Image (cartoon, rainbow, N blue to C red):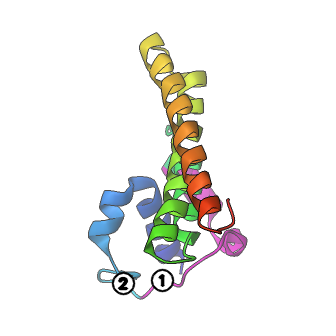
């Protein structure tokens, strides 16, 4: 179980490209099927091992949070599901931009982070509006 937990954490922090290459409809290549986990089920994870894997990555928490929320956005048809996943993706971009604002030393990067927050917030508002117009609960 510990190996599966560490592998799952690695996939979450490695990004969508790695996860897409390694995952096949919920099954990890060469490994036992990993059950879906909600945030409340993460208490059994080896948080020490996860902390070591994320050492030096100031974006790790924001990345993991974004991926977990994107994976849990499963309600509705393809249009609604895409909208809900993209809202979480944009919120993740905002969280990472806030880290860059605080920790990046380059002023140009901090300026790009500011612009990212402004743009992503506008996009989220448009997607929330789409949900409302289609009788869906905004998130």
- Indicate which disc residue 34 carries: 1
- Residue wearing tag 2: 31
User: Where does the image place residue 125, in percent across and percent down from the top left?
Assistant: 60, 45
**Residue at image coords 50%, 52%:** 89
The overriding secondary structure of the stretch rendered in magenta is helix
Percent from the top left, x then y, of residue 10?
44, 60
Q: Nearer the viewer, residue 137 or 9?
A: 137
The answer to whether mark 2 and mark 1 are in CB contact below 8 A is yes
> Which span is picked out in magenta?
33-53
Secondary structure of residue under mark 1: loop
Q: Position of residue 30 (x, y in %)?
A: 29, 83
Q: Secondary structure at mark 2?
A: loop
Q: Residue furthest top?
A: 107
Which class describes the residues within 10 Å of circle 2: few (<14), some (14-19), or many (20+)?
few
- The label number, if any, that marks residue 58 in the structure image: none
Q: Marks 2 and 1, Cα distance to the nearest angstrom?
A: 8 Å
Q: Is residue 12 at all visible to an observer of this figure?
A: yes
Picture quadrant where residue 18 is located: bottom left
The relative height of residue 25 versus residue 11 in the rendered view (above or below) is below
């Amino acid at each position: 179980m510990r190996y599966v937990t560490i592998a799952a954490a690695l996939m979450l922090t490695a990004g969508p490209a790695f996860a897409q290459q390694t995952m096949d409809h919920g099954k990890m290549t060469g490994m036992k099927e990993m059950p879906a986990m909600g945030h409340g089920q993460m208490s059994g994870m080896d948080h020490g091992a996860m902390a070591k894997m994320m050492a030096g990555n100031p974006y790790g928490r924001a990345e993991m949070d974004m991926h977990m929320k994107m994976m849990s956005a499963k309600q509705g048809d393809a249009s609604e599901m895409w909208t809900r996943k993209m809202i979480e993706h944009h919120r993740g971009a905002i969280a990472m931009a806030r880290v860059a604002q605080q920790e990046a030393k380059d002023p140009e990067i901090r300026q790009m982070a500011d612009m990212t927050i402004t743009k992503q917030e506008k996009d989220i508002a448009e997607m929330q509006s789409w949900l409302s117009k289609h009788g869906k609960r905004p998130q």
